[in-house]
């Protein structure tokens, strides 16, 4: 009987260990699992944010290139405007005087401005010089066999003998060709920009797909 009574406290200690120690271990495991699940969710959120940021980065690069092209085109137009307004009449629109259809029927009913169309003896105005170079380029094909000096002298005399109306028609033709070249340049730059943006978007999408596949495999 004595042995049975003495053995009772030991059995109570074993039951205490079973019912009180193991539940604590289970709670620790649950906390660790909960933290792991929270970390997995956080990793998924960060991955989604990275994908969105990659797409935003590609679009930002495309917009920067577009802005640079627009800036270059605007600078070119500004230079053309400054060169045209420097020799035109004050308070006139940007369009040069030799392109105005109603130029001869304006306030001054006299002959056109010689500073724009060039005088009979010399071609010193920058605009007139450009028009004269265009005239040399178009009309000089007839004198290819002659030397440059002879060809220049012939075309210069021909230019000096031309009337203001004939020079106006040449100036209009010159400006139309310039406008066509600018439009072609803008179209080409837009096509190149579109190709670059498409290639960047495709590259970003491929990178995202590679990352997703690598994560799925791991």
Image (cartoon, rainbow, N blue to C red):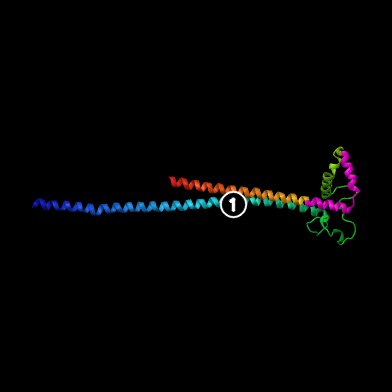
Residue 79, visible in the rendered structure: no
User: Residue 154 placed where, x, y %?
Assistant: 89, 42
Q: Quadrant of the C terminus?
A: top left
What residue would you read off at disc 1? 60
Q: Quadrant of residue 111?
A: bottom right
User: Residue 141 placed where, x, y %?
Assistant: 84, 42
Q: Which residues are magenta?
A: 149-176
Q: How many marks?
A: 1
Give the dominant element type of the magenta stretch: helix, strand or loop.
helix
Of residues 127 and 202, the one drawn nearer to the viewer in this rendering? 202
Left or right: 145, with 68 as reference point: right
- Residue that extends furthest to the bottom in the rendered view of this protein: 107
Mark 1 Cα-neighbour bin, 10 Å: few <14, some 14–19, many ≥20: few
Q: What residue appears at the point 79 percent right and 52 percent down from the top-left corner? A: 175
Q: Is residue 191 magenta?
A: no
User: Residue 210 placed where, x, y %?
Assistant: 50, 46
Left or right: 32, with 6 as reference point: right
Of residues 16 and 95, the one drawn nearer to the viewer in this rendering? 95
- Residue that extends furthest to the left in the rendered view of this protein: 1
Q: Is residue 159 magenta?
A: yes
Q: What residue appears at the point 47 percent right and 46 percent down from the top-left corner? A: 213
Left or right: 209, with 5 as reference point: right
Q: What residue appears at the point 81 percent right and 51 percent down from the top-left corner? A: 173
Describe the element under mark 1 as helix, strand or loop. Answer: helix
Residue 139, visible in the rendered structure: yes
User: Residue 182 placed where, x, y %?
Assistant: 73, 50
């Amino acid at each position: 009987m004595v042995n049975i009574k003495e053995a009772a406290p030991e059995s109570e200690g074993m039951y205490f260990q079973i019912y009180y120690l193991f539940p604590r271990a289970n709670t620790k495991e649950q906390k660790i699992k909960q933290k792991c699940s929270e970390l997995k969710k956080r990793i998924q959120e960060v991955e989604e944010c990275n994908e969105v940021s990659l797409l935003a980065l590609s679009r930002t690069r495309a917009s920067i290139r577009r802005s640079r092209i627009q800036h270059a085109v605007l600078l070119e137009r500004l230079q053309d405007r400054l060169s045209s307004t420097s020799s035109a009449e004050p308070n006139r629109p940007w369009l040069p005087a030799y392109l105005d259809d109603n130029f001869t029927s304006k306030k001054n009913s006299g002959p056109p401005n010689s500073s724009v169309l060039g005088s009979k003896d010399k071609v010193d105005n920058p605009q007139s010089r450009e028009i004269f170079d265009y005239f040399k380029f178009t009309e000089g094909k007839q004198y290819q066999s002659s030397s440059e000096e002879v060809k220049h002298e012939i075309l210069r005399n021909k230019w000096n003998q031309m009337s203001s109306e004939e020079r106006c028609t040449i100036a209009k033709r010159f400006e139309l060709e310039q406008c066509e070249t600018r439009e072609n340049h803008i179209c080409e730059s837009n096509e190149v920009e579109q190709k670059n943006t498409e290639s960047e978007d495709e590259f970003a999408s491929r990178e995202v797909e590679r990352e997703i596949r690598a994560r799925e495999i791991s």
